[in-house]
Image (spheres, coloured by chain):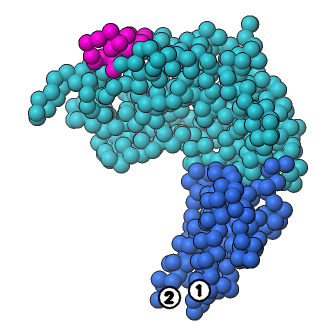
Chain colours: A cyan, B blue
Amino acid sequence: MSFNASVSAQDFPILTRKIRDDKRLVYLDSGATSQKPHVVIDAQSNFYRMQNAAAHRGAHQLAEEATDALENARQIVANFLNAHHDEVVFTKSATESLNLVAYAMGNAEKGNRFHLTAGDGIVVTEMEHHANLIPWQQLAARTGATLSWFEVTPEGRLDLSNIAQVITDKTKVVALTHQSNVLGTIIPLQEIVKRAHEVGAVVVLDACQSVPHMPVDVKALDIDFLAFSGHKTVGPTGIGIFWGRRELLAELPPFLTGGSMIENVTMTGATWAPAPKKFEPGVPSMAQAVGLGAALTYLTDIGMNNIHEHELSLTKYLLKEFEAIEGLTVIGPRDMNMRGGSVSFTVGDIHPHDVGQYLDSQGIAVRTGHHCAWPLARKMGVPASTRASFYLYNTQDDLDALVTGIRGAQKYFG
Amino acid sequence: MQLDNLYQEVILDHYKNPQHKKLNPVYDAQVHHINPSCGDEITLNVSLDAGMVKEVSWDGVGCSISQASASILTDLLIGKSLAQAQEISDAFMQLMQSKGTESGNADLLEDAVALAGVSQYPARIKCALLGWMAFKDASVQALAKNS
């Protein structure tokens, strides 16, 4: 394997920055947002510099070039997910993608397969990020459908022991995260998809924490919809992906309406363009789409398997190191079975904010709090935790710095 | 270390030995405030007596800054007139928004000036204000109830 994280790190200009009294930046917050390599920054700024025009509009060369750039980016995303070009919808964020599918289902009229009423069921899990929980709570509230969920075990795994009672004949949608942004747990998707499809429900996968870090093939996973965000995949902010099976996108009503998502418009009504345009009103985030294309090309060149293996080896190393720190509790799986590169923990009675502040003083960037998964934090019995999350540019040195930092915090607040 | 500006000894002392951190079951008003960005929570009880802050008690979970700030608040405001409490609260708010340019009036703010360093860490200002916003809310409610 030719992958070397130290070499990859050189592609990311921000990692040469000094933080707080000239400390080396140790960036362990990629679960919140990833850093950007030169190729992404250049691709985005080159679009603005040389090709900027409104894609799919205008009778001029720049508009043609912008359209080509946008559609080329769409093809890169499609290839990355093993999807079709017309199944990939550009949104502004993964949050928007998840709201899109939830609101679009809410717009479905009687007779449409997505139409929900009282008596229908929506299933989520206790480990959802708020972005894949609240849209479904709201959809349930608007339609009268019942929201139910898989619980999380003390080890931080999904409890599927009652799967037949949670996913029933009434269930229309099962929306769940591929990998917990807090626990790092990778869920047993296959079993859930099988059960969901048995009862005729569609599966919506929040892949924000998986697509950036491991190979994700939508066909192999046999899912129906998927969302991920550009900025967590070394791409720009302001771009998200919504993927759906072609035949399902054809039936799903639109969410946001406006320019360029139409087929025909009169003063009293409108008909819709086919997907993906049906879901892309307004001038798209073109520069961001181009940047995302560059990001996924960059990741593909390195190899998603290489990235995944690298993060697993970092996680394994950190979990081992953590065992030696007295008072440190890992929130989530302590073994490497079905687990990704995100480790949440508490350090004795020291509040995570204080841990995070001390680590920051050492140049180490981590996330603290409930990580936008408040019900999960409550379930795990910790109001807040500290999270270290990794990416291809992190090295064992970064983890050693973290361990030293945690010991420093213990001394400082002890 | 720069961090020592933030975590002054007084703060760590209040954090380890928080004052009035036990809810008095008798109160004029009780409020529950949350910092939604981090999940810190405080429940705070206030009793007034003839325009005076008779008692403040609280309970909660949170970081050293939020806990110390609530503790300092109780020491500072109990026994003061509502007008004085208002003046102190306003001065504290101003100090928190000073971005490190003010050190605070020690005659007025006493131990609370130890929190001056917080104003240099924008993400932590809400932590320091959690108890103060709760007090503001509770005292208004208590006043309304008593009038």
Q: Chain of mark 1?
A: B
Q: In x, y percent, where is residue B67? A: 71, 63
For the residue pair A205 and A12, the one nearer the viewer reads as A12
Residue A130 in magenta stretch: no
Taking the image as drawn, is residue A349 in sight? Answer: no
Q: In x, y percent, where is residue A208? A: 54, 29
Residue A5 sits in which quadrant?
top right
The residue pinned by badge 2 equals: B146
Residue A305 sits in which quadrant?
top right
Q: Residue at x 29, y 11 (%)?
A: A60
The residue pinned by badge 1 equals: B48
Mark 1 secondary-structure assignment? strand
Marks 1 and 2: same chain?
A: yes
For the residue pair B102 and B56, the one nearer the viewer reads as B102
Q: Earlier in the sequence, mark 1 or mark 2?
A: 1
In the image, A192: left or right of A38?
A: left
Marks 1/2: CA–CA distance: 8 Å
Q: Chain of mark 2?
A: B
* Labelled pair 1, 2 in contact (Cβ < 8 Å): yes
- When the figure is inspected, residue A41 is found, relative to residue B117, above or below; the finding is above
In the image, B111: left or right of A173?
A: right
Magenta stretch: give its range.
A54-72
